[in-house]
Every structure is written in structure tokens, then in C-alpha cells.
Amino acid sequence: MTRAEIIDGKLFAERLRAEIGRQVVRLREEHLVTPGLAVILVGEDPASQVYVRNKAHQARGASMASFEYRLPHNVPQENLLELIARLNADPAVHGILVQLPLPPQVDTDRVINAIRPDKDIDGFHPVNAGALATGGDALVPCTPLGCLMLLKHRLGELAGLRAVVLGRSNIVGKPMASLLLREHCTVTIAHSKTRDLADECRRADILVAAVGRPRMVPGDWIKPGATVIDVGINRIETPDGKGRLVGDVDFDSAVQVAGSITPVPGGVGPMTIACLLLNTLEAACRQLD
Ligand code: GUN
């Protein structure tokens, strides 16, 4: 049995960020505009703090302007909405990201709906979600966009392939399915209520796992030669107490069956942030007068 090719998302993301950096410099030279990314973090969740720091750091690494806003966990919703209104009106800010999840006193949908759709670099606003679903000109959620780039890099043409997306979230599953449909795949969305998950997965030429359950997909759910994209980032306990990150796919058994597979870490994760920068650049270009 041959082992799957490992899809190196870290390397792909590094190259993408370098290319974005070059385009940012060109935008500044030709239009005197520096793309600006505003990131809002509510509360002190350690994982979210790491993500937000990474996003700001990488934005600066791509020669963009980065603005960080940290609000206490008990911030009133009105204050958050006021900040978003201010950023919506600020011409130096081209992209706004509110790190999720938000604390319970805040209505997440109201916050997402308050972001100007052309600054919604997460692609979560209903205007962008609707445009993606209807084939319009959307800002596309970063994680599925990164997955699609890896798939096209690995497979080239996707038309006619059978794709199974495991998970139906608004952040990954649904937009991923829309993107694959746009590429003319035959798409199934499978989820916790699907009757025979293993059977559905075994039919997939492309399997995208985005359920947030550590190592849920074993190798014997995978069609030999399939391309497997693992979106999961789950921390599990280890005997040494340090913990370790694993995906939604059981890598060790899947790598024996798949044709190619993304590792965790170093697969989809780095692509998500690179695509956030790509969306910020795209938003800045769209906002040129
Ligand atoms: N929290 C986890 N993933 C994401 C994401 O893609 N965007 C935002 N805003 N928050 C997140």
C-alpha cells in the first residue's frame, strides 16, 4: 500500500502570503492605499488571543496596516456595535473581523449584520453568504477558500468529482459545499444526523472533514486514492500533560488509504490566515474609488 501525498498547507500559505505582500506594495505604489485589517477580540479566551495575535502579525508581515481592539468579556453589545460603526466609516480600514465565539450577552447575528458587507472579510454577512450561494461576487469565508485552493492545487480540474463535506456550519460546511458546487462537483453535505456517515464518506473523491471531533474519520471511511482535507483543530490530552493538536481525521490510518491528505497542524490552518489577508487585499481593491 502506498502512503498518501501530504498536502503542505504551510508552504502553500507562505507562498500565497509572499504574493499578497507583493500586491500590497503595488497597490500602495499605484493607488496610495495600504490595506487595513481591524480585528476585534471580546474577552480573554487564550486560543482566540493566539489567533488574533497571529492574524495581526501576519497582516503586518504582508505590509498591511493592522488595528487591534480588545474589549472586556462583559462589554455591552451597544459598545461593540458602536465600534463596528466607527470602523465601517473609517477609510483606513478595509476589512473588519470580529473573532468568534462571542460572549452570551452579545447577539452574534446582530454583530455580523452590522459589518459593512464590503468590509466583511470573514464572508459571514448574509449579503456575502447569499452571493456565494447564488453565484454572485462574494467575499468568501477564509477556511473554505483555503481548502478550495489546496484542492485545486492538488487536483486541478474538480468538475464531476464526488465531494462529501462533513459538517454543516455557516463558517465552513455550507460555504465549502457552495464553493465545490461552483466548481461543478457533485456535492453531499453529511452531518451528525446522516444515516450512514461511513457509507457517504466512502463514495467521496474529495472528503472535507469539518466537524470538530478529534479523529472521528477512520481510514476505512476513505475511498482509496481520495483527496482528504482535514479542517479540524482539536487539542487532545497526552500522557506527558502537554496535549497535542489532532484533526477530525485519524491521520495514521487515513494516510494509508487516501491519495493525498492535509496534516494537522500545517494543513488548512495556515491557509485560513493567508486567505484572510487575501480577502483584506480584495476588499481594499473593491473599495478603490
Ligand atoms: N473563530 C474561529 N474561526 C473563526 C473565523 O474564521 N472567523 C472569526 N471571525 N472567528 C473565528
Image (cartoon, helix red, strand yellow):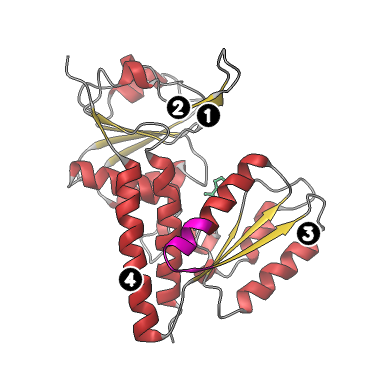
Q: Determine contact: label 3, label 2, CB under 8 Å.
A: no
Instruction: Say which label, 4 or 3, has the lower sequence index.
Output: 4
Q: Which residue is mark 1?
A: 234
Give the percent coordinates (x, y) of residue 211: 49, 31
Q: Which amino acid does the dot numbered 3 rest on?
A: Gln
Quick one: label 4, few (<14), some, or many (20+) residues within 10 Å? Answer: some
Of residue 268 and residue 157, the one placed in the foreground of this image is 268
From mark 2 to mark 1, how far is it between C-alphas?
8 Å
Q: Which residues are magenta?
A: 57-65
Give the percent coordinates (x, y) of residue 26: 33, 77
Q: Which residue is mark 4?
A: 23
Instruction: Say which label, 4 or 1, has the lower sequence index.
Output: 4
Q: Which residue is mark 2?
A: 248
Instruction: Say which label, 3 or 2, has the lower sequence index.
Output: 3
From mark 3 to mark 1, how far is it between C-alphas?
30 Å
Does 284 sit above or below residue 59?
below
Q: Determine contact: label 4, label 3, CB under 8 Å.
A: no
Q: Which amino acid does the dot numbered 4 rest on?
A: Gln
Residue located at (30% from left, 39% from top): 8
From mark 2 to mark 4, how far is it between C-alphas?
34 Å
Give the percent coordinates (x, y) of residue 197: 41, 21
Residue located at (48% from left, 29% from top): 191
Quick one: label 2, few (<14), some, or many (20+) residues within 10 Å? Answer: many
The reply, left or right, for residue 66 in relation to residue 21 is: right
Residue located at (30% from left, 36% from top): 163
From mark 4 to mark 3, how far is it between C-alphas?
36 Å
